[in-house]
Image (cartoon, rainbow, N blue to C red):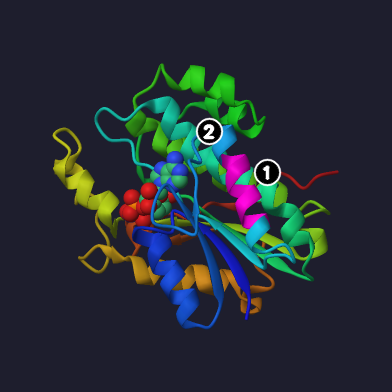
Amino acid sequence: MSTYVISGAASGIGAATKNRLERDGHRVIGIDLRNADVEADLSTPAGRVEAVRQVTELSPDGIDGLVPCAGIAGFTGTDPALLISVNYFGAVALAAGLKPLLDLRDAGSVVLIASNSVTCQPGWAADDIVAALLADDEDTARRLATEHEAVNLYPVSKFALASWARRESVKPEWGGRGIRINSIAPGLIATPMTDELRKDPVFGPFADVYPNAMGRPGRAEEVAALIAFLLSPDSSLIIGTMILVDGGTDAILNVVPPRSDERTTFPS
Ligand code: NAD
């Protein structure tokens, strides 16, 4: 039996992952605003510290994995700065804060939740915000975010998460000591978040505009299955990657995979 920590555990993908892992015989510590083992607001530094404190109290002898799943969408009226704080800092601060508990075990796994909006939603580039996020500069990122619409900041926050996973995963203190970091990029998944999307006066009509090969939205359980695999020792060679779990949306919209001459060069 392993002990896993999941934020956003009260709803949608987080709840499905909690159910899946518990069914597989694991212990899950859920974090959420309400209806969770640890009730904390991950949009603020104080809330994140409190979440780490409570998880540490519940599992002082360590944890085997972390899934920072809490996130919000960029709907009409969503505060852009709040989106950045929850989706990016609410995830990476948990990873950093719970690292001492991961270090207590021989191996571990962190699965960040990106999104296929990174490769499928057009026109979201905001390099200055991505740079501020990866520099761990929340004040600057929040200030810059107010110049954008939340809908375009959603893929920004998710791209930065996938980039953080890539950068950190290969460091000696993570991958080097057996703690694997990866991200996953779900497409449209039927959850309370996408139920809300359909009600949005501006973005609702776009809910089903992204095609996939199955002709139906993904199910939270299908995403949970990938997360369970990435947490398990069966995925021991998978480090630093972003795995799409979108029923083929990315394959339909981006027909040509990346070519070798578009890759970055090897470090000298
Ligand atoms: P959801 O709305 O059903 O669940 C999100 C959970 O996060 C909720 O329980 C909510 O209370 C919690 N949360 C929000 N703000 C919080 C805060 N400040 N502190 C603590 N908890 C907070 O959403 P979902 O669809 O299950 O999404 C889960 C994750 O998957 C999110 O990161 C989302 O961006 C990502 N995602 C979802 C989809 C999709 O189509 N549903 C697609 C790609 C990625």
Residue ID for mark 1: 264
Please determine whether, in this image, residue 239 is positioned above or below residue 258: below
Determine if the C-beta at disc 2 is less than 8 A from ligand 1.
yes
Foreground label between 1 and 2: 2
State which quadrant residue 183 falls in: bottom right
In front here: 18 or 236?
Answer: 18
In front here: 261 or 74?
Answer: 74
Specify whether 93 is left or right of 172.
Answer: left
Please determine whether, in this image, residue 248 is positioned above or below residue 136: below
Residue 19: x %, y % from top left:
42, 73
Residue 159: x %, y % from top left:
51, 42
State which quadrant residue 240 falls in: bottom right
Q: Which mark is residue 138?
A: none
The residue type indicated by label 2 comes to: Thr
Verify whether residue 134 appears in magenta.
Answer: no
Circle 2 crowding by C-alpha within 10 Å: few under 14, some 14–19, many from 20? some
Residue numbers of the magenta segment: 48-56
Q: Is residue 91 visible?
A: yes
Which residue is found at the position 42% from the left and 47% from the top? Answer: 33
Residue ID for mark 2: 44
The kind of secondary structure element at disc 1 is loop
Please determine whether, in this image, residue 161 is positioned above or below residue 44: below
The residue type indicated by label 1 comes to: Thr
